[in-house]
Image (tube, rainbow, N blue to C red):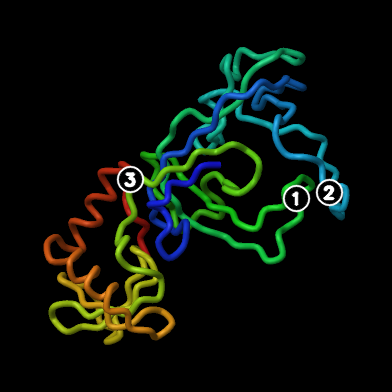
Amino acid sequence: MVIDLRVVVESEFRAGDVLKVSCSFTPARVIDVSSAHVSIRWPWWQSDPDAVGFDWNGNVAIARGADMPDWSAELFRTEPSAETLQAGADCRVGIPPTVVHVIEVQSFDPPIETGWLPRPHCEIVVLRRGVSEDVNAVEQGSGINPYDDIPLIIDLVFRPYAFLNIGDDVADCRGRLWRFDGPWDLYAYDRQEGIPTWPLALVAGGDGSVDAERQALVAAATTIGSHETEIETWRRAVHAEPPAR
C-alpha cells in the first residue's frame, strides 16, 4: 500500500480526512451469484489457521448492482460489471479512484480475529463523496484495513484543521480556550456554545507540552481564514455536510 506522507501528521488517519482510494484491478474468479451479490474468490488475504470460531472460505461478496442497498457503501467493483457476471466466470476486482471521507478510525490491540490474515490492527470507516454521516445510524460506510495485503493506494485530499493534533489546547482571538478532539469536536472550556474565532494560538499539546515550532505553525495557518471557511473547504471536497453533534 502507498500512503501519501502528507497524511502523516499526529496520526495517519482521523475522522474528517478526505482521501482518494484506489486499488489496481486484479484477476479473480466468480464462485457464486445471487440476486444481490457476486461471490468472488478473493485474490488477497490468507485463511487464518489459528482463528477461533471463524472458518473463512476464501470468498468475498460484492454488491451486484446499483439497485442493491449496499452498492453505494461498497468500494470494490468488478470488470466486467458485477450484474453481468455468472458463476465460474473470470473477472477482475479492484477499486477505481474514489474520493471518500473518514467517519471513524478504530484501533485493535491485539489485532482482531476475522478468519483471514493479516489480522487487522486498524480500520478506517469511510463514506463516498456525496454521502453525509448520519450520527444516529447503527452502521454506515465501508471499513478499510489500510495495512493488510490488498494493494491500496491512499492519498490525502484534504484534512480540516491539519495544523492541529488531537488533544491540543488552543486560545482563539477572543481569549476563549478550546480543546481540539477533531474538526467536529471542538470543546470550549467555558462550556458556552459557539465556534473558535481565528487566529488561534496553540497553548499546549495533548500531552501538556509546549512546542514553539508548532505554535508558530498554528499562528501562521490561522492568520487568514476562519472556522467557517475551513469547514466550507471540506464541504466542497466531499459534497456532504458535517455530522451534527
- Asked if labels 2 and 1 touch by Cβ distance under 8 angstroms, the answer is yes
* Residue on which disc 2 sits: 54
Image position, residue 238 (x, y; %): 33, 43
Give me the C-alpha separation between circle 3 and circle 2.
37 Å
Tag of residue 137:
none
> 111 left or right of 160?
right
Q: Residues within 10 Å of mark 1 (few under 14, many from 20)?
A: some
Q: What residue type is labelled 3?
A: Ala
| Sequence-wise first label, 1 or 2 | 2
Where residue 199 appears, as percent x and y from the top left, is 15, 71
Q: Do the residues labelled 1 and 3 touch (CB within 8 Å)?
A: no
Amino acid type shown at disc 2: Phe
36 over 74 or under it: above or below:
above
Residue ID at (23%, 57%): 230
Q: Which residue is drawn at 57% across and 17% down?
A: 79
Residue position for label 3:
240
* 3 or 2: mark nearer the eye: 2
Mark 3, secondary structure of its residue: loop
Residue bearing mark 1? 114
Give the CA separation, mark 1 to mark 2: 7 Å
177 relative to 51, above or below: below
Q: Label 1 vs label 3: CA separation?
A: 32 Å
Vertical order, 201 against 107 (above or below): below
Considering only order in the chain, which callout, 2 or 3, is on the residue closer to the N terminus? Answer: 2
Image quarter of residue 68: top right
Question: Which quadrant would residue 220 be assigned to in this image?
Answer: bottom left
Using the image as rendered, state which of residue 185 and residue 113 is in the foreground. 113
